[in-house]
């Protein structure tokens, strides 16, 4: 098994990403390639319930990412998912006021999908000024998520989530192309992503 690396935030690293593409990315203590990390340690994970309200609207977090660049809904969904998951893992609270379900193409917030479904496969872009009030610790988390995953395509992020326990667990018993609305467990998200964290 590959040893967990201690790497600094925002360190440049060249990575090859399966069949999609190869590129040089900016990485952080959040690892983007998780297929070599297999253990789950529940110690230190407090119980997180899906009923918790969430610190921000999912649309505020989506707008924050859309201010970085225009993107497809698939990519936006996965970035919002990773923001939620890493907040559970590293902060222990619910960042967004939404659940993520284990859809065929990866984790999806139904509320976010409903808002942007008219775009289809076209990129979503923001026009004009958008003011998003975030606490500094949450802004830093989002920047780290962006630095880790932001250069990936939506398809690459879909493939990544398909190798990770939270989505796989929620899809258990479903066929690959079968519709599924099972909510991905916040506690599994917290424990899984904490277990692959490379930071201090």
Image (cartoon, rainbow, N blue to C red):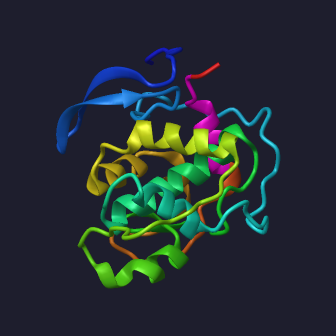
Q: Quadrant of the C terminus?
A: top right
Where is residue 167 shown, x and y percent of the image? 50, 56
Using residue 157 as the reference point, say whether residue 9 is left or right of it: right
Residue 188 sits above or below residue 108 on the image:
above
Where is residue 180 shown, x and y percent of the image? 48, 74
In front: 144, or 134? 134
Residue 131 sits above or below residue 165 on the image:
below
Q: Give the residue drawn at x 59%, y 49%.
A: 85
Residue 63 sits above or below residue 43 on the image:
below
Where is residue 149 shown, x and y percent of the image? 39, 42
Using residue 31 as the reference point, say whether residue 73 is left or right of it: left
Q: Give the residue drawn at x 54%, y 45%.
A: 142
**Quadrant of residue 123 in the image?**
bottom left
> Can residue 167 be spotted in the picture?
no
Q: Is residue 194 magenta?
A: yes
Q: Give the residue drawn at x 49%, y 29%.
A: 37
Q: Give the residue drawn at x 67%, y 56%.
A: 95
Using residue 154 as the reference point, say whether residue 131 is left or right of it: right
| Magenta stretch, residue numbers | 188-198
The majority secondary structure of the magenta stretch comes to: helix
């Amino acid at each position: 098994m590959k040893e967990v690396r201690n790497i600094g935030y925002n360190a440049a690293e060249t990575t090859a990403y399966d069949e999609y593409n190869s590129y040089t990315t900016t990485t952080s203590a959040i690892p983007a390639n998780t297929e070599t990390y297999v253990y789950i340690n529940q110690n230190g994970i407090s119980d997180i319930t899906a009923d918790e309200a969430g610190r921000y609207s999912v649309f505020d977090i989506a707008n924050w990412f859309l201010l970085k660049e225009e993107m497809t809904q698939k990519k936006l969904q996965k970035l919002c998912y990773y923001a939620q998951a890493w907040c559970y893992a590293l902060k222990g609270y619910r960042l967004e006021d939404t659940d993520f379900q284990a859809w065929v193409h990866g984790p999806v917030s139904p509320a976010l999908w409903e808002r942007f479904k008219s775009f289809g496969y076209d990129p979503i872009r923001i026009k004009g000024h958008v003011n998003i009030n975030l606490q500094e610790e949450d802004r830093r988390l989002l920047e780290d998520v962006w630095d880790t995953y932001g250069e990936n395509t939506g398809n690459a992020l879909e493939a990544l989530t398909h190798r990770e326990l939270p989505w796989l667990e929620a899809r258990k018993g479903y066929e690959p192309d079968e519709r599924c609305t099972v909510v991905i467990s916040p506690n599994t998200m917290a424990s899984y992503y904490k277990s692959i964290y490379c930071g201090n």
